Amino acid sequence: MARETWATRVGFILAAVGSAVGLGNIWRFPFITGQEGGSAFLLVYLAFIALIGFPALLVEFVVGRRTELNPVGALQELGSGAWRYVGYLFVATGFIILSYYSVVAGWFLRYTVIGVTDGYAAGAADPEAAEALFGSVATGLDSLLFHALFMVLVVAIIAAGIRSGIEVAVKVMVPAIIVLLIGLAAYGFTLDASAEAYAYYLSPDFGVIAENWTSILPAAAGQAFFTLSLGMGVMITYASYLGEDRNLAEDAGIIVGLDTAIAVIVGFVVFPFLFAAGLTPGDGGAGEIFVSLTAAFAEIPAGRVIGTVFFAMVGIAALSSAISILEVLASYLMDEFGVDRVPAAAGLGVAVFVLGVPVTVDLVFLDLLDLFADSILLVLGALLLALFVGWVASDAAREELEIGIGDLGGLGEAWIWVVRIPVVVVVAVSLYLGVV
Ligand code: PFF
Ligand code: NA
């Protein structure tokens, strides 16, 4: 059977945008920004996206389109046998990230349901009530059930295939995310506290960068890779379904631009909500956004509707990302072992569900897995892939980049050199700082 392909270029771009835009932009970005000193972090992060994220996205794209294979097969074909272990690293990382990603996504579904059935008043009375609500959502049977529900949705989309599953789903989900988010930001603008919130968000303190760069740098690197779905083969896999030739650089620019714009807009949504409820963005943790936002939704006008829409929007964004991770794992089973799509998706869904169960029991596992995946696995994966493409497969990579764009003059060569040295060095330093 011929390998599946995207039906349209827009389908491919929306799928990649859907993968990029997710919990990383909405759940992780505000609390990392809070933890790392507000807008100072934002600035380093933006520099990282442009200088490291964009070339690294192109690296994954050329590997995928060139080989038309899953990450393990792709690296084996382009490199010698040993490079395939980088592919295995990607597959392992996918399992780990999806297992906790699904649990957290389940919380957003649960909070959407709470908005419909009860509203968020329970979080208004006092911070302890909001904490207690979060505790009951995040652990125990509820958490397990919504983790299961979320994985069922992910499996159903992947089982339906590239065109009728992923492509149809993202054509609905990605526009919905954008419309809802812009609506929420416009609402945030109407709140009295918005001016104060924007000021907090948009006034970087350069002193903070100079003082804390050893923690800001790895955090920004990890967040840049996480948010662009880099370092575990998602973009290799998605590009492997590109049949004809296109301009990969243009596609990458659109994807990076949209993901970054959405992350920045999320700040314009979340910070006004928090300031309106008299809260300061903070010192965080994974539960912070739930606890403080439910308190905010209990306060602000029409908070119940706004909150329900917000949580639903995040749930949709999480779904369009989670499917890309399961597709990496499924493509590996399909390409390398000839497993059919439906059993591959279902079997992997069960395995990921089981792996996520400990997170529903104790949130300690969430922090551990998130930290390990983000500051080590993704960064290591991106580093190894940059070394491979920059130094081992650079001729094939440059040639592949030029297909659909034409002769780039010196630009193709310049890209290779950016990958060879700046990307490798900065990522290696970030990895080192993240480990020590
Ligand atoms: N990019 C997604 C987000 O920002 O939520 C998360 C993600 C998806 C990370 C796929 C890694 C990945 F391979
Ligand atoms: Na993202």
Image (cartoon, helix red, strand yellow):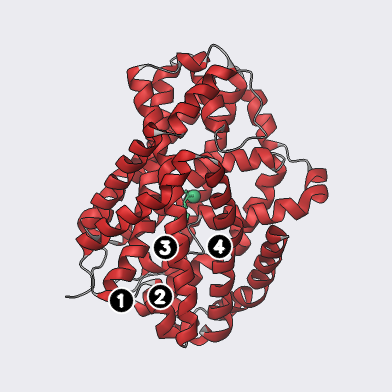
Dot 1 amino acid type: Glu
The tag earlier along the polypeptide, 3 or 1, is: 3
Element assignment for label 3: helix
Q: Residues within 10 Å of mark 3 (few under 14, many from 20)?
A: many
- Please tell me whether mark 3 or mark 1 is closer to you in this view: 1
**Is the CB atom of the residue marked by disc 3 within 8 angstroms of ligand 1's nearest atom?**
yes
Mark 2 and mark 1 in contact? Answer it, CB < 8 Å: yes
| Residue to which mark 4 is pinned | 377
| Residue to which mark 1 is pinned | 336
Dot 2 amino acid type: Val
| Residue to which mark 2 is pinned | 72
Q: Residues within 10 Å of mark 1 (few under 14, many from 20)?
A: few
| Residue to which mark 3 is pinned | 234
Please give the name of the residue rendered at 67% of the width and 71% of the height, measured from the top-left corner.
422
Element assignment for label 1: helix
Between the residue at mark 4 and the residue at mark 1, the CA separation in whole angstroms equals 23 Å
Q: Position of residue 124 (x, y in %)?
A: 52, 14
Q: Position of residue 5 (x, y in %)?
A: 25, 67
Q: Residues within 10 Å of mark 4 (few under 14, many from 20)?
A: many
